[in-house]
Image (spheres, rainbow, N blue to C red):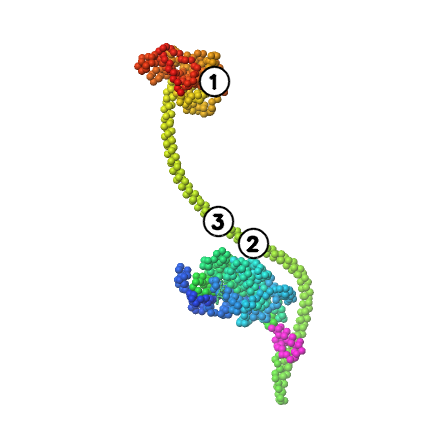
Amino acid sequence: MRSAKKYEFRTPSRSKQNLNQEKDPVQVYCRLRPMQRDTDVVCIKIISPTTILMTPPSTALSYRNENTKSMKYTFKEVFPPETSQQDVFDKVAFPLVQGLLKGENGLLFTYGVTGSGKTFTMTGEPHNCGILPRCLNVIFKAINDLQAHKYVFKPDKMNMFDIQSEAEAMLERQKELHKFKSGKKNNSNPDLIMSNTDASKIEGIKEDNQYAVFVTYVEVYNNTVYDLLEDGPPTKQLAVKIIREDAARNMYVHGVTEIEIKSAEDAFDAFYLGLKRKRMAHTILNAESSRSHSVFTIRLVQAPVDAMGEAVIQNKELLTISQLSLVDLAGSERTNRTKNTGQRLREAGNINKSLMTLRTCLELLRENQINGTKNIVPYRESKITHLFKNFFEGEGHVRMIVCASPKAEDYDETIQVMRFAEMAAEVEVVKPQIHDVVSNIGLMSGRRKANKIFKTARDHIARPEAKDLEVDLGLVYSLGPDFPSIELNSPQASHVIKELIAHLEMRINRAEIIKRSKAIQDERLRSALLDLEKESLEVRSINTSLKGQLSSAERRIKALEERLMSTENTSISHQKKHKELTEYTSMLKRELQEKELLLSQYKLDKEKQKKILERKYNHKIAAEHEKAKEIIIEKQKLKNAIEEKENILRNIANAVHGHGDNIDAVPRSTLEFGAQASVQEYTPGSTPRALPAHLLTPFSSGHTKDNRETPTSRRGVAIANPRHRRSLSADGRGRGWVEHAPNNMVPMGTVMKPTLGNSKHVNKLTNVKDITHTKRSKYCLLSQQQDTDGEVETMAYKGDIVPTCGGGAQVIFKDVELLKQFSPTKERESHSTSGRHSCARHSGKRRDTGCSPPQTPSNTSKKQRVDDD
Ligand SMILES: Nc1ncnc2c1ncn2[C@@H]1O[C@H](COP(=O)(O)OP(=O)(O)OP(=O)(O)O)[C@@H](O)[C@H]1O
């Protein structure tokens, strides 16, 4: 019960107070549904009115895993398949309705596997209705005459109610009448009309109270709350609602449509409108109805009537609000058995999560209650537990009907349901406390009935035929019992007269009392009226100022509410966005993983290819190595051949060994260029044999004697004009020779030396001008050495001096003259030639050099000329 006066103190956090209060365990019932086919194997057997025995079939998972034993489960009561809807209602829901009318909160939910009969039990079928319609029938049957006029109680949208005056309520009724005339449809389905003939009557209703019934119908689908009674066409998409805490920390669905209903028919209309919306929404969302939890809540508001028994006392503190929530939970099947995918899987996941949360909450609550622990119960994790947090932490009656199908196929799921039920039965909920607020206001009970009788009497007296009427006004004003039947048939019967006198006196006394009381009451009334008049004047003035304040406060509230709504909408959209982003992120992660997998696969392939290529190239490299070795051997051979030739050249160079030092002294530019040009002039075969090594080496090997870098490598091509030739006649015009001969020549007269006319003799080339002098156009280098026979031979290397572009000169060798002296005796032995001396001329070119013939010393000397091509 929630009386407004005590309202602020009845919060779940008041657990200390709850500790001293009586508690009731959650009452768990079990209803077995009939088997569909006679051939189906059964796994549940009822062994007593409160106990069932579950035997695992061989096909069950638990049979295969570990649990082959039969298990007993005990309930408050077990309903066999043939139990009627009425019986189930009477035993389970009727006490809750009784509590509701007394002002106590109640929660009833059906729990079980899909198809086990939850909806059948809660809603029922046409002409075999379930708990919900029966509850409505019983409630309206009980409060039928005691209902307040519509809109006297008005929801304040914050989970509480305002009380309106009769006039205000009437105005709203008239407005509604207009709305109704302008096309409000009747939602009831004639096929689904539920019989109310067998509704049980509830006794002990407070007749001095006025009552109003309000209903809400919400659906929790994918952990989102939707309002099923929202205004608008059924095709409209359902708005998302949020769960909030009211001023007294009670949970409620904010902004939910709460309809005031005046009869069971109105209630069915509302219920079927909700069902229609639900079906329509599920069609739009392509969802299954059994995938959502539906919560139908009946709120009963009661308030005492005033002293006249006429109207509700306009005091919010005297309100008593109680609620009965009927919850049809979604099926608790396993996802893997149903082979759900996509949206169905998400639905199933959400259902399982919310049922799991319910289970966790109950487990923790039980642990807290049994062990005195203070575990935080995660009510907020699912909308269903969040909404019913107050039942477990506050006061109320909680009942659960576990629906089960005895089919062996469902064993694995049903056993989970039974375990949950067993655990839930151990949770205790504080018994509701009745706060009789009315007894404190000093009003007599029975005033409403008195008022009714009085009114009837007044109506009747006003009619002309009133004299014939018998009106029992005893409860209102009475002069005492009726006159005794008196028969005065003898003069001795004076006692009769005495009796009559006494009776009359008693009546006169009573009449006097009534008159006095009336006079007092009149006086009271007069003074009360005066007071009222005064009060009324004050109230009117206060009222006007309050009205001003109120309207401004209302405007403020409205603005705040709008802001709140928009903030909530933003929050919802953010939540949605967050959810989408989370899904998107996980999708990206999945993609990344896939790509990484591909990448690693690709890397593996590359590695393999690399290895194959490596093997291939290793073979090739080995072959190349082989080839290189062969080339090196070839090179070595060539080198050897070159060395051999170089040796020969060195021998030739030795012939001019004596000039080495002198030659070195010659300005490098001159000789080097000359030698370079010589190389250009001579054929490769003749050059090495024709020149001394000290002249050839820099150009043939690229290095000077001391291994310095050669000018060739630095200077590149020759800078002389190789076509420069001095005409032979130039000699005749006074141009002469540069005779370059060592000092220590063998002194043999002219035999071993050619005679050069107009020559300048130099031992060492130290001065450039010796070469560049305009009067010198020919150059002759003389050298002597011992031949293989031990004879002296003289070599005369002859060349032209050619000026170079840089102002220097170079020598182009073109002739070699070999002068040799032979012993005549030796010659006789070995040669057929006569004469002691011979002279050989070895020319690098066949061309005539124009040089003077060597001097023949005697006829014993012989000049041998060798032309070498
Ligand atoms: N006790 C019963 N007596 C007769 N028929 C029953 C009983 N229980 C269930 N049924 C039938 O079984 C079928 C499935 O029941 P119901 O729709 O109530 O299951 P459910 O548990 O609500 O399933 P879901 O979780 O899918 O909503 C219905 O056709 C219903 O008529």
Residue 639 in the image: x percent, y percent?
Answer: 38, 27
Residue 130 circle label: none
Residue 591 circle label: 3
- Determine whether, in the image, residue 805 is placed left or right of residue 463: left
**Whole-number angstrom distance, CA of label 3 to CA of label 1:** 87 Å
Looking at marks 2 and 1 on the same chain, the residue that comes earlier in the sequence is marked by 2
Vertical side of 183 occupied by 748: above or below: above
Vertical side of 426 occupied by 592: above or below: above
Q: Amino acid at mark 1?
A: Arg
Q: Amino acid at mark 3?
A: Glu
Query: Depth check: 8 or 274 in front?
Result: 274
Q: Return the residue at label 2.
A: 573
Looking at marks 3 and 1 on the same chain, the residue that comes earlier in the sequence is marked by 3
Mark nearer the viewer, 3 or 2: 3
Vertical side of 787 occupied by 9: above or below: below
Q: Return the residue at label 1.
A: 725
Q: What residue appears at the point 55 percent right and 63 percent down from the top-left corner?
A: 276
Magenta span: 449-477
Query: Depth check: 580 or 598 in front?
Result: 598
Looking at marks 3 and 2 on the same chain, the residue that comes earlier in the sequence is marked by 2
Q: Quadrant of the C terminus?
A: top left
Q: What residue appears at the point 38 percent right and 23 percent down from the top-left corner?
A: 646
Q: What residue appears at the point 37 percent right and 32 percent down from the top-left corner?
A: 629
Q: Secondary structure at mark 3?
A: helix
What is the crowding at mark 2: few (fewer than 14 residues within 10 Å), some, or many (at least 20)? Answer: few
Q: Residue furthest top?
A: 858
Q: Quadrant of the N terminus?
A: bottom right
- Determine whether, in the image, residue 832 is placed left or right of residue 8: left
Vertical side of 737 occupied by 381: above or below: below
The reply to whether the magenta stretch includes residue 468 is: yes
Residue 468 in the image: x percent, y percent?
Answer: 64, 80
